[in-house]
Amino acid sequence: MSYSATAARYRVPVGVLIGLVASVAVLSRFDGGASVGMVGGPLVSDCDGAIRQLVIHYVPEAAEMALPTYRDFLGRLPPDVTVHIICSDRSAFDEVVGRVGTVECELSPVIVGHAITTWSRDRWLALAPAHDGATTVLLCPRGEQGAEIWPARAGDQRVGDDLAAWLGPRVGCKRSDLFFDGGDFVSDSETVFVTPAVLRRNLQRTVATREQLLARLSAVLRRKVVLLHDAPQHHAGMFMMPVGDRTVLVGDPAAAERLLADRADVDVADLCQGEGPDFTAATIARFDAVARQCRSAGYRVVRIPIVPGGDGRTYLTYLNAILDRRDGRRIVYMPVFSAAEALNRAAGKVWAELGFEVRPVNCDACYPHFGSLRCLVNILSRSNATDTVFAGSTGAASFFTPRVTDGANPLRATKRPVRLLAEVTSGLPHGSWTPGKRLADGGLLEGWAPGQLPDPPRISVSRCGKFTYEVGPEGVEPPTKGL
């Protein structure tokens, strides 16, 4: 058969061919396309592990809104934290560095060459590396709302790819086929809480049912997913925050209203500009509904005062925070507001009673623009979410025989994972540490088979079901051999 005859037999209209090629190109941008080989680990937790890398945006035109918060926050970060600052051009980076002033953390430029907004949180979700040496995956939404008509929002849509190009191969970018904002999610090391907005934006567009959305989210985020069915119509970090130890802080407008009732020095109407605070029964009920759903998911709920605005977007909230866990300490970078000192004190007390060191960050300038600290800051990476509690000498591995009898185990049963470090001369302690071995009390022992111990050897105990291991706040001394 000649070429011309073959071509005639399989002739396809040019328009159809163009359409097919375009479809392949579009599909390759989403979860199963060109990035099919890029597999992330679980969603980076909001409350577990030490912060290593953060991302903020800087837009000179929005400097007066963001700079006071950046200055407070960056000035309190430790020196081992790197802050990647996304800017349209180098002059913007030089400007923010000069205006922030002296800081201990490292400030690193990411110059993108296009317009962006100030809000970093909504652009992507960070999926931790699936294993040692793997890539951190930035999961970006299918599209940004308003990108068709707003150049800065269209630029936001490119930020994930910009970061991957700047920081690769340590960081990769993958575009989801789901619509969401990064602010729609809050997470600990076990559960991701998701706002109802994600279901509204995707139902009958990208998924057929609620169950299908849950399955898709669970698969990509690699955590249990709680899809809230009733909640305030705002990003999750404005009204709730997991804090570790299977505890969730949930906003309490009723508590704020009671606290402010007798404060003659506070003009309550001015706390939320425009329509003022919203302490209606319907709004309070939405916050209470979030608390009930968290309890139903097996979490302890602690309430904290919060002032939602009548416009539904302006929140005076102490939950839009950044949490850090390092060197045995729990730290919260908590938004504070100059016009609400009584609320600041009450909220700080709640965090402190949960064991957090409170580092206040002024959010006076940004909160009238419908977001606070967490909205401006995204977390790219944290250290391992476990805590090193003991580095033993040769032979000390025998101290960590996984027995829990009459309280003799050196670790206490609480609700936080713990990693034990021990120098092992050969094999596994007593030959009893095997991968996936379930303990009698319901714990799950994670270890390595003989001959596969890493250097240095690590023996890890993590939560399984209801039982977990944790050291006390002052550390733990290994018991005598043979306990």
Image: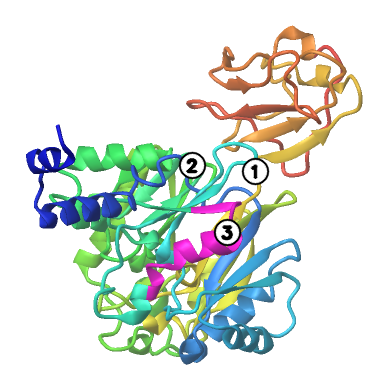
Q: Tag 2: Cα neighbours inside 10 Å, few (<14), some, or many (≥20)?
A: many
Which of the numbered marks, if any, corresponds to residue 319? none
Where does label 2 land, which residue? 42
* Quadrant containing the C terminus in the rendered view: top right
Q: Which residues are magenta?
A: 155-172
**Closer to the N terminus: mark 1 or mark 2?**
2
Is residue 350 in view from this perspective? Answer: no
Determine the secondary structure under disc 3: strand
**Closer to the N terminus: mark 3 or mark 1?**
3
Gap in angstroms between the C-alphas marked 3 and 2: 18 Å
Q: Give the quadrant of residue 427.
A: top right
Query: Which amino acid type is shown beneath numbered disc 1?
Result: Asn
The reply, left or right, for residue 428 in relation to residue 66 is right
Q: Give the quadrant of residue 434.
A: top right
* Quadrant containing the N terminus in the rendered view: top left
Is residue 407 in view from this perspective? Answer: yes
